[in-house]
Image: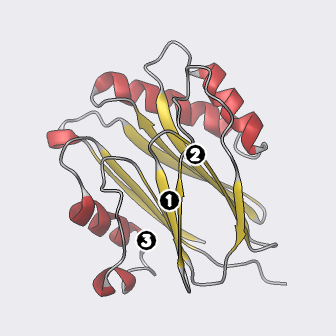
């Protein structure tokens, strides 16, 4: 896997309510994208707390991960969270999200994912989990609502898929709404060698 991300605060502020991280455990990867509600310092605190609890539960089932984060950030303003768990050996991708986070798998065809309605940190319901196969060279993109919902890849973007960090910067530049913090994570997918 090759991963990269970009986040930008609204109006260039020094506190960003969008945050991301990823972890690897052998052939399994977990990618987490968090959007603390609103923007500014309180949103950044909620996002940082959510990532801390996500790391502690990075390789649990989706249900347990969301329950752990939900319990851990009560008292904050809450967050929207998108999680992708990638099993490179099985070449499968599991997606689950709560709130207005999105993802798309760009491959032979494009498959899009939405978050289950709710706010993590408020006793949210467990999201539905979608599991699907991926092929080597497919590109996974996760983004917050600081970028437009119709995020897609043009030819110039496709040429950057081998450099996910540069691609994430380009996608924030092209699709930012200018009304909220923006976060994008890109992952070039590849299966484990047999």
Nearer-the-camera pick, 115 or 8: 115
Earlier-in-chain disc, 3 versus 2: 2
Q: Residue at x 81, y 72 (%)?
A: 90
Identify the secondary structure beneath mark 3. helix
Asked whether disc 2 touches disc 1, contact meaning CB atoms under 8 Å apart, the reply is: yes
Q: Quadrant of the C terminus?
A: bottom right
Viewed as shown, does residue 146 lie left or right of 2?
A: left
Nearer-the-camera pick, 139 or 16: 139
Q: Nearer the viewer, mark 3 or mark 2?
A: 2
How far apart in space, not on screen, are marks 1 and 3 (Cα)? Answer: 15 Å
Q: Residue at x 44, y 43 (%)?
A: 100
Q: Position of residue 160 (x, y in %)?
A: 37, 81
Nearer-the-camera pick, 17 or 96: 96
Residue 54, numbered label: none
Earlier-in-chain disc, 2 versus 1: 2
Q: Quadrant of residue 42?
A: top left
Q: Is residue 98 above or below residue 186?
A: above
Viewed as shown, does residue 19 lie left or right of 31?
A: left
Q: Quadrant of the N terminus?
A: bottom right
**What color scheme is it?**
secondary structure
| Residue with the mark numbered 3 | 164
Identify the secondary structure beneath mark 1. strand
Q: Position of residue 130 (x, y in %)?
A: 69, 57
Q: Is residue 96 above or below residue 139?
A: above
Q: Is residue 161 above or below residue 183?
A: below
| Residue with the mark numbered 1 | 103
How far apart in space, not on screen, are marks 3 and 2 (Cα)? Answer: 21 Å
| Residue with the mark numbered 2 | 97
Earlier-in-chain disc, 1 versus 3: 1
């Amino acid at each position: 896997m090759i991963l990269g991300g970009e986040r930008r605060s609204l109006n260039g502020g020094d506190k960003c309510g969008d945050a991301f991280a990823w972890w690897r455990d052998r052939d399994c990867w977990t990618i987490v994208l968090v959007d603390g509600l609103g923007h500014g310092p309180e949103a950044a605190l909620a996002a940082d707390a959510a990532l801390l609890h996500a790391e502690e539960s990075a390789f649990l089932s989706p249900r347990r991960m969301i329950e752990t984060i939900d319990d851990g950030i009560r008292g904050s303003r809450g967050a929207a969270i998108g999680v992708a768990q990638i099993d490179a050996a099985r070449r499968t991708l599991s997606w689950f999200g709560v709130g207005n986070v999105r993802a798309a798998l760009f491959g032979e065809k494009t498959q899009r994912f939405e978050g289950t309605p709710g706010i993590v940190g408020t006793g949210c319901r467990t999201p539905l989990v979608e599991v699907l196969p991926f092929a080597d060279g497919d590109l996974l993109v996760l983004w917050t609502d600081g970028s437009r919902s119709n995020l897609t890849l043009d030819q110039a973007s496709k040429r950057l898929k081998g450099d996910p960090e540069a691609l994430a910067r380009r996608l924030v530049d092209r699709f930012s709404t200018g009304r909220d913090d923006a976060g994008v994570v890109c992952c070039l997918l590849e299966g484990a060698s047999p």
